[in-house]
Structure formats: structure tokens, C-alpha cells
Amino acid sequence: MKTLTEPCPVLYYIHDPMCSWCWAFVPVWQQLQIELAQWPLRVEYLLGGLAPDSDAPMPEEMRQMLQATWLRIQQHVPGTEFNVAFWRTCQPRRSTWPACRAVLAAANQHQEHAMILAIQQAYYLRALNPSDDTTLIQLAQELGLDVDRFTADLNHPATHERLQQQMQRAHRLPIHGFPSLVLQTAAKTQPIALDYNAAERMLQAIKQAL
């Protein structure tokens, strides 16, 4: 039996808004959160930060690797959509920290989750580049945010610091990539194996751990 002072269990979702496997996980993650809504635990998002700031064009080898990853995801998670026009119309860079900071800037206006989805849809469906601040500011405008405040927050030193803090917390958890789920209870901290096609096994694993 839980005591009155025992902390509420936390399910950490460790992600990056420009992670293609995170995009593939969206439908089942949304379903999982619906199922968990009445459970005695708290869900907390942590940004993992795949790639630091860079203005360098993405090397051709990496471009080919990521396109192959998109194809592999579609084979592993049927129904996942990717707009390959991105590779023709944009100048890809290996830089996801700007998108991560956009999530934090949007969180200041209580639109963290909306911004995550907007970034994913911009990248994977609309062939827009979330490594560019101009794209991120466009998304903020489309979401109805205070654009002046968002623009100021996007590259504010405090936002940089918050991202570093979240990444440090994320990498102290038992993760092996993005996305990851980690359940923390009073007794232990344990990873939850992901299923990209159904929520049932994850629900069972969380139930057993609780």
C-alpha cells in the first residue's frame, strides 16, 4: 500500500522533435497516454537533443542514411508518412537543438505538445526544415503563439540552459536512443520496452512495475 508521503510514479518520455523514430511512435504514444490518463502516475517529457547547432550542410552519406532510415521505419511501422521532397527542396543540416529550443519556447506559452507535433508535421509531411529559426517562427505563428515572445525566447540564454538541463537529466536515465520510456517509482527506475504498433505490451509492463 502506498503511503501518503510516497511520491507519484513518473513515466519519462525522452524524445527529440526531429527524431524520425519519435515520429513513427506518435500514434501509439498518443493511444498509450489516453490509456494512462486515469493511472496513478505522471508523464514528463524530456528532450534528448540529437544533434547540436550547426550551419554546415548535411554530408551526403548522412543524407542517404537518413533516407534509408525513413524507408526502414515505413516497413517496420506501416502507415508512417514521410515527404521525401524534403531532400530536394531543403538544405538539410544535422542540427536538432533549434527545434528542441522551440519546444521549450512554446512551453512558456503552454503549447509544448502542440509545437512538438507541428515540428514533426513540418519536417515529415510538409518538407519544411525545423533546423531553421524561420521555420520555427512560422510554426509559432500558425499555432497562434505570441510570436514576439516566442522569437525572443527561442535563442535566449535561459532556453539554452534549460535544454542542457533536460539533456543531462535524460542521459542519466537508462535509455538507448530516442524515443525512450522510463518508469520511475519509489523502488526503482526502469526502461519500458517500446512497441511501435500497439500499446498493450507497454501498458502491461507499466502495470506490472507499479
Image (spheres, grey):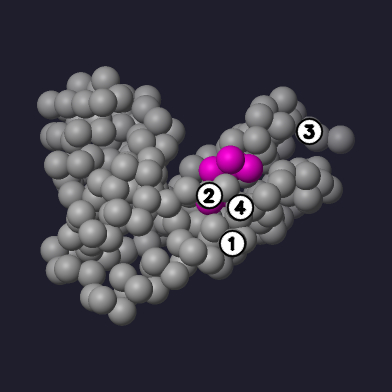
Mark 2 vs mark 3: in front:
2
Task: Kindly report the distance in space between the C-alpha atoms of the residues bearing marks 1 and 3.
Answer: 46 Å
Q: Is residue 98 left or right of residue 48?
A: left
**CB atoms at circles 4 and 2 under 8 Å apart?**
yes
Labels 4 and 3: the sequence-earlier one: 3
Instruction: Select label 4 or label 3 by which is in front.
Output: 4
- Mark 2, secondary structure of its residue: loop
Report if residue 174 is visible in the image: yes
Which residue is more in the foreground, 50 or 167?
A: 50
Q: Are marks 4 and 3 in contact (CB under 8 Å)?
A: no
What stretch of residues is rendered in magenta?
24-29
Sequence-first tag of 2 and 3:
3
Q: Residue 24: horizontal and vertical position, in percent? A: 53, 51
Label annotation for residue 75: 1
> Which residue is tagged 3?
3
Q: Amino acid at mark 2?
A: Thr
| Mark 3: secondary structure | loop
Looking at marks 1 and 3 on the same chain, the residue that comes earlier in the sequence is marked by 3
Q: Which residue is mark 2?
A: 80
Q: Is residue 28 magenta?
A: yes
Eye-nearest disc, 1 or 3: 1
At label 1, which amino acid type do we have? Gln
Check disc 4 and report the residue beneath it.
Answer: 78
Q: Residue 36: x percent and y percent?
A: 69, 33
